[in-house]
Amino acid sequence: MTAVGSLNRSFASSNRAAETSGVLYVPRVQPLDGALGALSFFTRLLKNPLRILPAAAYEEGIVWAERAGRLVCWITDPALIKTVLLDRRDVFERTSVTQRLLGPLLGNGVLTADGADWKWQRQTAAPVFRHHDLLSFVPVIAEAAERLLGEWRQDEAGATRNIDRDMTLVTFDVISHTLLPGGESHVGPLIGRANVDYQKPLGWQMAYANFKIPAWVPHPGWLKMQLARRRLRSAVASLVAERRANPTGKDDLLQRLANAKNPETGAQMPDELLIDNLLTFFMAGHETTAKALTWTLFLLARAPQWGNRIAEEVRQVAGDGPLKPEHIDKLVITTQVLKESMRLYPPAPIMSRQARVDSELGGAPIKAGTQIIIPIYAIQRHRRRWTNPDHFEPGRFAPEVEAQIPRYHYMPFGAGPRICIGMAFSLIEGIAILATLARAASFGVAPGSDPEPISRVTLRPAGGMPLSVHLR
Ligand code: HEM
């Protein structure tokens, strides 16, 4: 039996179990239990990096392993995570693997840069991400969700939609009508195809990086990946050229970055770096929220009682009208469902750092270059830190219960000074879209669909997410 076969089988049998127990059980991806030969390890990593997460990472706080002659360390212990992301962050930097996966597309922008290069870019963008200002985007977000509903209404009743794609397009619609106006015409036509072409082969690049195989060695999808990268960068370059020629005077993210000056040199952000940052915000700014919503709708298809509760709540708070900024904080159940979905299916499932210099971690000496993996997926399904870690129980995020969750047990947005800059934006957006869609529709899982979550920087459902849509 192949690994894929056994995994699908365990998914199917556990879904039957879920139907009988009444509380939805969503099994974790099978962890790695025991040592593997190099070829099996490579194949497993290629299929899904979550399949090489050691079983011990779900039970212990720190796990060491040797990979291609190098020491790798998985940490799920809250104190160690704090050490790496906060207390001794100057020792732990972005990894060469991250640079290799994302550097070709995102260059030296705020997500990929380190040190002083990172700091001024983060400070430049930060003022655009104030919670109160972001709330003013709610009507635009609700309109984007309504546009999608309009498409669903054209379909036959109960038609199956590719929800992964729908969520990608609706979140792109949002980012290009809020933070990055103009994105629709330049980058819009590429979204859907180009980011899939870039992300799909990332498994190869990750496996290559772990086995020290150079990035230029071709692999399936290599050419498409290079083309997607070139197309995306040149689309953003034309957006930059247009904005430089016609400054709008608005204080949007694009204009802030275009006006920014490096405090050390006093020079304006060069076009290449501006493109790096815009692509960073285009990609990070829609893809992750899209995945959060995709998995949430999947969970609602499996546990429709939660979809009904959301629909009731939204009607109570907003009636049948469009969502407004003042509704967001009142959508308590909607928020709980979204947060619990991001616990079981963290849209960015694995973070990593590497030691910049020789140092120590958890009492053990580590050499410069040692990779530290922070597996959000395992942290949020940790056997000792969560009761029923694989069960979908949104009540964990009822305000008084959520307040008891210790820091670093739940961290879909990371932690420390490099915590996701878009956290408030994506929560507001996620709540507004989920509320609008779940008020209007319920969802069903197409027969035979039982997607494995695959880590390709973001958490993608294997084979997409076909769900049937039933308008209420
Ligand atoms: C559900 C949605 C999202 C999730 C789960 C998520 C998750 C994350 C995580 C885990 C990190 C930390 C990575 C690390 O430290 O290694 C991060 C960083 C980042 N995110 Fe998000 N993100 C989301 C939405 C967004 C949005 C909407 C934007 C922009 C509009 C955004 C922009 C960024 C940027 C620029 C960084 C790098 C920050 C830095 O290094 O200073 N993200 N995100």
Image (cartoon, grey):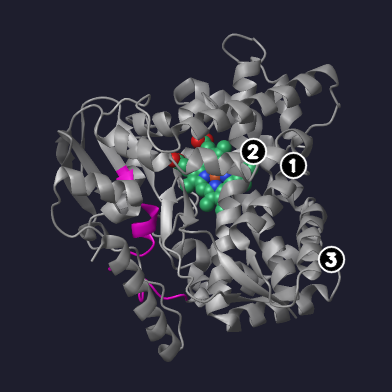
Label 1 and label 3: CA atoms lie apart by 20 Å
Residue 309 located within the stretch drawn in magenta: no
Start-end of magenta stretch = 373-392
- Tell me the tag on residue 72: none
How would you rate the neighbour count of disc 2 (Cα within 10 Å): few for under 14, some for 14-19, many for 20 or more?
many
160 relative to 462, above or below: below
Q: Earlier in the sequence, mark 1 or mark 3?
A: 1
The amino acid beneath tag 1 is: Ser
Residue at 80 percent across and 70 percent down: it is: 153
Q: Position of residue 287 (x, y in %)?
A: 58, 48
Tell me the element at label 2. Answer: helix
Inspect this view and state whether residue 269 appears.
Answer: no
Residues 124 and 238: in front is 238
Q: CA distance from mark 2 to mark 3?
A: 26 Å
Q: Is 285 on the left-hand or right-hand side of 79?
A: right
Residue tagged 2: 282
Question: Of residues 204 and 95, which is closer to you in this image?
Answer: 204
Q: How many marks?
A: 3
Q: CA distance from mark 2 to mark 1?
A: 8 Å
Which residue was labeled with disc 3?
322
Query: Are the two marked residues, 1 and 3, in contact with CB atoms closer than 8 angstroms?
Result: no
Mark 2: amino acid: Phe
- Apparent side of residue 77 relative to residue 234 in the rendered image (left or right): left
The kind of secondary structure the magenta stretch mainly shows is loop
**In this image, 290 relative to 352: left or right?**
right
Q: Where 234 sits versus 427, above or below?
A: above
> Residue 135: x, y in percent?
75, 53
Label 1 near ligand 1 (CB < 8 Å): no
Quadrant of image for the N terminus = bottom left
